[in-house]
Image: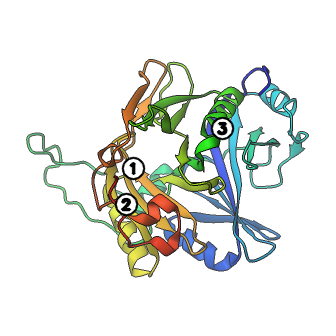
Amino acid sequence: MTTSPKIKVVRLAFVHYQHSQLETAAQFLKDFGLVEVSREGSRIYFSGFGADPYIYVAEQAPGPRRAFLGGTWAVESENDLQIAAAHPDASKIEDVTGPGGGKRVSITDPNGYRVSFIYGQKLREDSSVEGTDRITGGEQPVLNLAVEKPRQGKFRRFNYGPSPVHKLGHYGYLVPQSAYQATFLWYTSLMNLVPTDAVFDPKTGEDASCFMHIDLGMTYTDHHSFFLAANPTSKPAFVHHSSFEVNDMDTQALGHKWLVEKGYTNCWGIGRHVLGSQIFDYWFDTTGNILEHYSDGDLVNKMTPFTRSPEAPDSLYIWGPNIPLGFVTGNAADAGKDAPAPQ
């Protein structure tokens, strides 16, 4: 890794997948709560109801195999593109043809995956009210708790359908154990990603996974926008999942029911994580990738202390179904099977 200045990113913009059956994959994405905004050749662009012009690119694979073509991060300034372009294995600065335009630089990480940086993308008008209203019928969710009951004389009514997605929250990789530390150092040296929480192997004391947030100083940001986990097998690195924010648990549960009744394959959920606190719901898409709906996640800033916790099932979730084998392996063929108990 060079001693170049870090690339300053401000948010995660979009992920890019290739699918062998593009139209089938596109239907799943719509049922998952994404909105098709544009088509260009073999690519389909999907947005949420936030300000990003798109958060997911679906592309026809050239053959029968699926592929993950990396995540793209919005940077603070055009100078950050210059910093990115100066790195080894970086592309030249190029124009982006998708909605919102902009300019981009791509770099190849140590495991062969692309990480890209975009600047000058024109954002769209945030349609948060529209996005939440579809489920709630125009009423913003107000909870009556055991003691505090602010909702008086008003009723909660919901519309059935997909969970409207707000934004892309995070993505991450399982990498060979031997490559974990080098991959971690590469990403945290490349850009302003800093660890929020790590989980370590109590037998060796070495980190087995890490959740990283975008360092925005005192400004609060998501608990993690990127994660890495060490795979004890020699299997090559692969993207484990990409995660998308929805408004609240009711929205999430309604979307869960929608996906179940459409016949899609649940990976794991609904439950609540410990680290990050998100309510989670993981699904296999029709190509075999894992996508997550999450809500009610933690926010952190530079004053949030970094923590390390021993690896254990109760470090992953506080409530929800047992950890399934499909979540551990990332393989849709393992869906519905319980993961073996740790030895």
Say above or below: 162 vs 81: below
Name the kind of residue labelled 3 in the image.
Answer: Thr
Q: Position of residue 144 (x, y in %)?
A: 16, 48
Q: Residue at x 39, y 76 (%)?
A: 260
For the residues labelled 2 and 3, the Cα–Cα distance comes to 33 Å
> Could you say whether the residue bearing mark 1 is in a helix, strand or loop?
strand
Q: Which residue is mark 1?
A: 295
Name the disc covering residue 156, or none. none
Q: In front of the other: label 1 or label 3?
A: 3
Q: Position of residue 264 (x, y in %)?
A: 46, 77
Query: Going by the image, does 170 lie left or right of 119?
Result: left
Q: In front of the other: label 2 or label 3?
A: 3
Say above or below: 287 vs 203: below
> Could you say whether the residue bearing mark 2 is in a helix, strand or loop?
helix
Query: Going by the image, does 335 lie left or right of 108?
Result: left
Q: Residue at x 57, y 68 (%)?
A: 29
Q: Which residue is mark 2?
A: 252
7 and 2: which is toward the camera: 2
Q: How is the model colour-coded?
A: rainbow
Residue 53 visible in the shown view: no
Q: Which residue is mark 3?
A: 183
Query: Going by the image, does 217 lie left or right of 46?
Result: left
Q: Are marks 1 and 2 in contact (CB under 8 Å)?
A: yes
Q: Are marks 2 and 3 in contact (CB under 8 Å)?
A: no
Say above or below: 59 vs 146: below
Query: Going by the image, does 296 lie left or right of 286?
Result: left
The furthest residue to the left: 147
